[in-house]
Amino acid sequence: MSEAKRSPVEILKEQSNYLRGAIGQELQDAGDCFSKDSVQLLKHHGSYQQDNRDERAAARKSGDSGKTHSMMVRTKVPGGQLTSRQLLAELDLADELGSSTLRLTSRQALQLHGILKGNLRETIHRINEVQLTTLAACGDVQRNVMGCPAPYADPLHQQLQRLVHALSEHFTPRTPAYHELWVEDPETGRRELAGGRVEQTEDEVEPIYGKTYLPRKFKTAVGFASDNCVDIYTQDLGFLAVVCDGEIIGYNVLTGGGMGVTPSNKATFPALAKRLAFVPPDRVMRVAEAVVKVQRDFGNRADRKLARMKYLIHSWGLEKFKAQVEEYYGEPLAAPHPDDVTGFDDHLGWDDQGDGKCFYGLNIENGRIQDNEQVQLKSALREICRTFAPGLRLTSHQSILLTDLEPAAKPEIERILRGHRVRLSAETSTVRRWSMACVALPTCGLAITESERALPGIMDQFETELARLGLSHEAFTVRMTGCPNGCVRPYNSEIGLVGKAVGRYTMYLGGRLVGDRLSFVYKDLVPAAEIVSTLVPLFVYFKGERVADESFGDFCHRKGKEDLTAWADQYRAGES
């Protein structure tokens, strides 16, 4: 691709000396923010520069620019697996250097907010001290690899989780810039920690990515057909385990999913991945590398809005894309196995691991770990981690699994949670446990309107109306975002609420709990205060006209927008 056809970010990456740029120099500067170029490169190191939009007015009154800058720091947690020590370290950072809260993401990662520029190096360094990393948690690279977090002791789950970690390791950038900036002793240059890979040759620092890395972010997940808890169809690359006679005989390869939409660009769209091929377990890494390299070499580097792999597949068609992957792979790929997704388990509540121990899945509303007057979740998790030192797994629905517990610990775990006013998963309504929201305001620069701060109150209304209609037991996904970028995957959910204007949302209906169908636009610019009342007529319709075992998403899909709209209009006319 010629110089004229590349976006400025592509040129920046190429000239950055493998993501170094001027970050080291700017870390020494007294200012409270990084330059535009460093902000772009810092994403690959796991950090976004943000400003608190709630504070802009006060900042302007004081004569400042109107922005109070801070950094979001994201920790990569492959498959959501971490230790109590690691979680405690992140909570300490939240209290000492951040905004006092920690967030679990919809990609099984961790986020700290409110980190000042002057504290960024210490924050990332301390994360590495507990053998975690922020490298490639963001940026134009393979991001956190997702995988079913269930800690079952059976060989299938263990094999899948080993693959998650192998993929994560294989695609971790090899640039030594990360260790130079955040891990090495700045005085001596000595590498203090063992974590991460820095092996390289002079000619090939990044054998997979090259100097310009990928055209855009790249997301991968590994899951089971019977339990699509990683939303595999929303990923750039998915490996769906095919199980036969108790063994994983291979994986169906899915390519080209992605949720992001840019409202100003009509060529952008959400997409679900397409079924590409079937590969045996020992060929997964080769196929994954072939797919990544095809995106590296042919993805759009001129327009970042069209740079995700879904647009390459849309432009080429699946057959041409498959042929190119086969060329890089070195041999033909088999057709996909008939197996496909059939279920979705959120893994909440108590369950046996199969090794004499048990785990507890705790619902964490919108992933926010904090203490306030209503609930002291952060303190509860601190006490549990210090007392029992459980293993921990993060889920794709922003919740947490406390693992490797002795059955005798169940009463004490519940006592600690209740003592800190934490609602147990069994006491959480079905609609609330299947809901999630992105961060949105005040820190996300893309947010148009509220999401995380708005959804709990909307859930209160949902609970009231569903109980009144006798539908409290129904399981359906509700996902809210503050903008069309779709960070919590609203476009394949049964009810998607996507920020369109301040206080107003585009309402999507008709997705599926198992995540293999896109929803359709039901209404645009719905005020936040009218979200639940807009849905009540449809819940009434669903209750009276559903077929046996039909979900709300399937009902909406079967009826379609016109039928649903006509019913709702008739229902409201009858009420007036």
Image: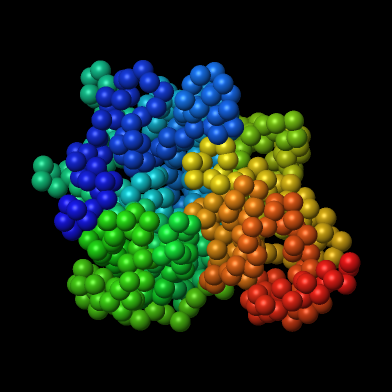
- Residue 167 shows in the view: no
Residue at image x 54%, y 54%? 488
- Residue 312 shows in the view: yes
Residue at image x 61%, y 38%? 369
Residue at image x 42%, y 59%? 265
**Residue 519, above or below 204:** below
**Residue 531, above or below 519:** above
Q: Where is residue 515 in the image (x, y as percent from the top left)?
A: 55, 67
In the rendered view, does 469 fall on the left or right side of 394? right
How is the protein colored in the picture?
Answer: rainbow
Query: How many numbered markers are drawn?
Result: 0
Q: Which of 554 and 55 is in front in this view?
A: 55
Q: Nearer the viewer, residue 465 or 3?
A: 3
In the rendered view, does 3 fall on the left or right side of 563? left
**Residue 7, above or below 297:** above
Residue placed farthest to the left in the image? Answer: 203
Residue at image x 31%, y 39%? 41
Q: Position of residue 381 (x, y in %)?
A: 63, 36
Q: Where is residue 466 in the image (x, y as percent from the top left)?
A: 80, 61
Q: Quadrant of the C terminus?
A: bottom right
